[in-house]
Image: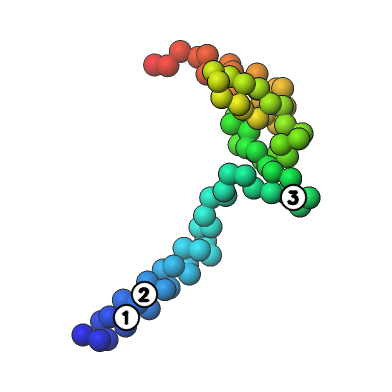
Amino acid sequence: MSRLILFLIILAVVYWVIKRAFFPGKGRTGKLDETGEELVQDPFCQCYIPKSQSYAISLQGKKFFFCSEDCYRKYVASRALPKS
C-alpha cells in the first residue's frame, strides 16, 4: 500500500513538472513591462501594450485599451455584425 501511495505522489510531481514546462499559465492582467509600467491587452488583436501608449476608449461604461485606432475600428465592426 505504501508503494502505491509513493508511486501516486511521484506521478503527481512528474505531471506537475511536465505541465509547468510545456503549458505555462496564462498571464495575469496588469502585467508590467521592463520599465515597470502596467501593460493592457488589446481586446481585438490580443497584444499587450503599455497603458500610456494605448488608444483608450469608453464603450457602454467600460474602458477598453487598443494598440491602434485600426484595431479599435475592427473591434467595433466585428461587434456590429449580426449574430446568426
CA gap between label 3 and label 2 equals: 39 Å
How far apart are labels 2 and 1 at the CA level? 6 Å
Residue 47 placed where, x, y %? 65, 38
Which residue does the numbered mark 2 point to in the structure image? 11
Closer-to-camera residue (53/23): 53
The secondary structure type at the circle numbered 1 is helix
Label 3: state its secondary structure.
loop
Quarter placement of the N terminus: bottom left
Give the mark nearest the N terminus, 3 or 1: 1
Does residue 39 appear in this view? Answer: yes
The residue positioned farthest toward the bottom in the image shown: 2
How crowded is the residue under tag 3: few (<14 C-alpha within 10 Å), some, or many (20+)?
A: few
Label 2 crowd (10 A; few <14 / some 14-19 / many >=20): few
Q: Which residue occupies the foreground of this view, 28 or 22?
A: 28
Q: Can residue 78 be seen by looking at this rendering?
A: no
Viewer-nearest of discs 3 and 2? 3
Name which residue lies at 41% across and 68% down.
15
